[in-house]
Image (spheres, rainbow, N blue to C red):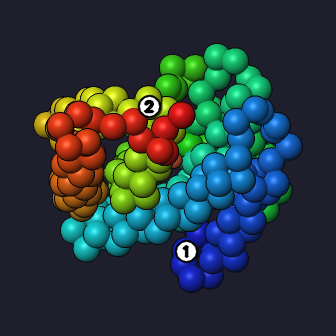
Amino acid sequence: MSKYTFPESLHLLKKAQEFAYECLINTKVDVEDMSEVAKWYRYEHSLRVANFGKMLVDDAKKRGIEVDEFTVRMACTLHDIGKFEAFLIPNMSHGLVGANMARPFLKSIGIDDKTTEDICWCITCHSGEFDQYEYDDIIEAHFTEEADDIDRYGMLRVLAKIGDWKESSANYLEVIDKVDKYIARLRRHKKNLRCTSPKAEKILRKEINLQIEAFYGYRKQMALTTDPEGKNVKSKYCD
Ligand SMILES: [Fe+2]
């Protein structure tokens, strides 16, 4: 357990939030399709993941499971700071890039070495590619990844997917095909879902079910977007 306890350590978490803002909103990375929307999505996603992380920690504590709240909340806040920088570093996951960015920041605000390395490990392995260094299997890393997953399967993702599909499809039949493939993916994910946190698993199953429902509803509407002969029309939203 780290020595950082809440609410005394809230100011450190606030500094992490400011650092995430610098890395994501004020990023110097200038790649082609980087929009303001993408930057804000990533920053706000980080704030939500931090709150989901806290939710999982609170639940674990009620169950008598030892988990370090400070490490989880810090890691969740910083987990995606390397998202854009990773575009410039081939063959390195955004998790590892983010951990390398977080380390000097954490030291600069006075976090001790052990807690810094725990947080960096959580950031590294949330992206699922961590074969470049080894570390103890700490529960905080699982919670960080699961908090991230919960937000990824939320309603905002549904809206973003629908927008992407409309833009990248020639007509509604193509959209329907993409919806069907995505629903199949969601079903597979739900089937294989195993979480360290029972709370995360419960929320994720609910979120995935909601996504499936939402995509089915959307699919039904797209299928009815036809001319009087029942032929699917070209969407005015699609090029
Ligand atoms: Fe994320």
Q: Amino acid at mark 1?
A: Thr
Do the numbered discs 1 and 2 sit on residues whose CB atoms are within 8 Å?
no
Q: Position of residue 131 (x, y in %)?
A: 51, 20
**Toward the viewer: 25 or 80?**
25
Circle 2 SS class: loop
- Label of residue 169 in the image: 2
Residue 56 seen in the current view: yes
Q: Position of residue 104 (x, y in %)?
A: 79, 46
Q: Position of residue 36 (x, y in %)?
A: 72, 53
Residue 107 horizontal side relative to residue 174, left or right: right
Residue farthest to the right, as pictured: 28
Q: Amino acid at mark 2?
A: Ser
Residue 55, by quadrant, is bottom left
Residue 90 horizontal side relative to residue 224, left or right: right
Give the answer, above or below, for where 28 lies relative to 204. Answer: above
What residue lies at 34% left-to-right and 64% top-to-bottom?
56
Give the answer, above or below, for where 130 lies relative to 55. Answer: above
What residue lies at 33% left-to-right and 37% top-to-bottom?
233
Q: Pick the quarter of the image with the C terminus.
A: top right
What residue lies at 76% left-to-right and 51% top-to-bottom?
23
Residue 161 seen in the current view: no
What residue lies at 81% left-to-right and 38% top-to-bottom?
29
Residue 223, by quadrant, is top left
Distance in Å between CA atoms under marks 1 and 2: 50 Å
Residue 70, by quadrant, is bottom right
N-term-proximal mark, 1 vs 2: 1
Give the answer, above or below, for where 56 lies relative to 234. Answer: below
> Which residue position is annotated with label 1?
5
